[in-house]
């Protein structure tokens, strides 16, 4: 019997989502003769009547799609079904409407591409139904538990490293300290990887307690050694627990550049990379990961599995129970390989000069 599965992308977009959608629909069609329905705008599409969804015709899903950033289905990181923001400012539980929307689609399974927050919401939403659900991890932050990689991270790191490549010559020309603030709501994965790849002198992440005076001293040491410019990477979350003094509305990167200028006498400039890290053409690595995850997710549904997430561990595609993933942010291991590599290269992490 032909089955029909649904797919939606939820949470902040990132590069590689289209490749994941394509992989799911192609595997479902070629592997099992199943139909795939794409639900629009994450869970928001389930509130529309009829539900905002479209059949994904495999003939339409050529490789061009895998090269494109964003998600052609649309997504949202607003609109928690259980506390949905209403126009009058109140919060309403709209999960029953969304479950009803799912029923209208007559699905035999659902695949959700999301970060830990979205996967948790989707898991909760599906708990009251008997619809099998499989999650695919995506987020530039790379902080989903039980997987070494999430779709979108590789591209974000490539963009951040490229930004450092561009900041270095202008910083050197003007003898400036160039501060690059990168994304990462709760974790420093992008920052540490970009700092190593992009040749930064200093990197500050939320997982390692840093002090401004150590950073100032390191810049002084670099100058004494004849270096006239420096590259500093700071994760957006690095300031939240370790900042010294009032930051006001300034981002941590802007705040840091200002403080370094005052403390070192060097000119400093901040670049807040922001959403540039999310909107690019996916790297080959993200396309590969998205393809492997999409195929595995469909295979899990075909094997009668549910309530699981696909993941990447030791260069293997695995699957893990979703309950082990939700509510657990995977932060940078302060004793892990990347931190040890950064230290070995002489990169200052702000915990010592
Ligand atoms: O979780 C992905 C992410 O890009 C974070 O790195 C960042 O803090 C946040 O989303 C930004 O969210 P928004 O797109 O709502 O500004």
Image (tube, rainbow, N blue to C red):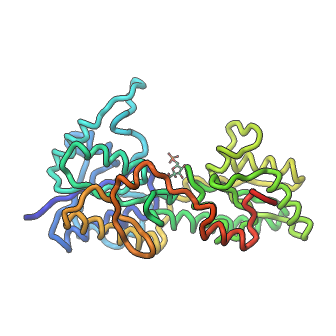
Residue 158 in the image, given as x and y percentages of width and height:
57, 68
The answer to whether residue 223 is left or right of residue 8 is right
Tell me the quarter of the picture where residue 202 sits: bottom right
Front position in the image: 91 or 217: 217
Residue 288 in the image, given as x and y percentages of width and height:
41, 73
Residue 65 visible to an observer of this rendering = no
Q: Which residue is drawn at 87% across and 56% down?
A: 266
- Asked if 4 appears above or below 106 in the picture, the reply is below
- Asked if 30 appears above or below 177 in the picture, the reply is below
Total count of labels:
0
Residue 70 visible to an observer of this rendering = yes
Q: Which residue is drawn at 37% across and 71% down?
A: 317
Q: Quadrant of the N terminus?
A: bottom left
Q: In which quarter of the image is the C terminus?
A: bottom right
Q: Which residue is drawn at 39% across and 57% down?
A: 71
Residue that sits furthest to the right in the current view: 224
Front position in the image: 301 or 74: 301
Residue 134 in the image, given as x and y percentages of width and height:
29, 58
Tell me the quarter of the picture where residue 294 sits: bottom left
The answer to whether residue 344 is left or right of residue 102 is right
Q: Residue at x 20, y 73 (%)?
A: 31
Residue 63 in the image, given as x and y percentages of width and height:
35, 73
């Amino acid at each position: 019997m032909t089955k029909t599965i649904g797919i939606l992308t939820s949470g902040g977009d990132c590069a590689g989502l289209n490749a994941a959608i394509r992989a799911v629909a192609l595997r479902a069609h070629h592997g099992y003769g199943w139909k795939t329905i794409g639900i629009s705008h994450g869970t928001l599409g389930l509130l529309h009547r009829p539900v905002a969804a479209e059949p994904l015709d495999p003939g339409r899903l050529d490789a061009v799609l895998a090269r494109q950033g964003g998600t052609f289905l649309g997504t949202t990181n607003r609109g928690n079904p259980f506390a949905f923001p209403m126009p009058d400012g109140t919060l309403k539980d709209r999960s029953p409407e969304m479950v009803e929307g799912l029923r209208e689609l007559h699905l035999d399974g659902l695949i959700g591409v999301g970060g830990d927050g979205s996967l948790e919401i989707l898991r909760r939403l599906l708990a009251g139904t008997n619809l099998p659900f499989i999650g695919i991890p995506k987020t530039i932050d790379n902080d989903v538990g039980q997987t070494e990689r999430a779709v979108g991270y590789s591209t974000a790191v490539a963009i951040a490293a490229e930004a450092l490549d561009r900041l270095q010559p202008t910083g050197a020309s003007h003898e400036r300290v160039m501060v690059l603030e990168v994304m990462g709501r709760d974790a420093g994965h992008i920052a540490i990887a970009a700092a190593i790849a992009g040749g930064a002198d200093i990197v500050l992440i939320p997982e390692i307690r840093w002090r401004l005076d150590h950073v100032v001293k390191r810049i002084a040491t670099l100058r004494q050694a004849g270096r006239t410019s420096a590259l500093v990477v700071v994760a957006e979350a690095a300031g939240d627990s370790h900042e010294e003094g009032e930051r006001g509305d300034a981002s941590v990167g802007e705040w840091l550049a200002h403080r370094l200028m005052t403390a070192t006498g060097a000119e400093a400039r901040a670049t807040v990379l922001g959403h540039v890290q999310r909107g690019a053409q996916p790297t080959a690595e993200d396309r590969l990961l998205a393809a492997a995850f999409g195929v595995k997710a469909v295979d899990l549904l075909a094997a009668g599995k549910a309530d699981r997430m696909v993941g990447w561990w030791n260069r293997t595609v695995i699957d893990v129970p979703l309950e082990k993933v939700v509510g657990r942010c995977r932060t940078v291991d302060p004793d892990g390989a990347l931190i040890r590599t950064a230290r070995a290269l002489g990169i200052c992490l702000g915990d010592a000069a």
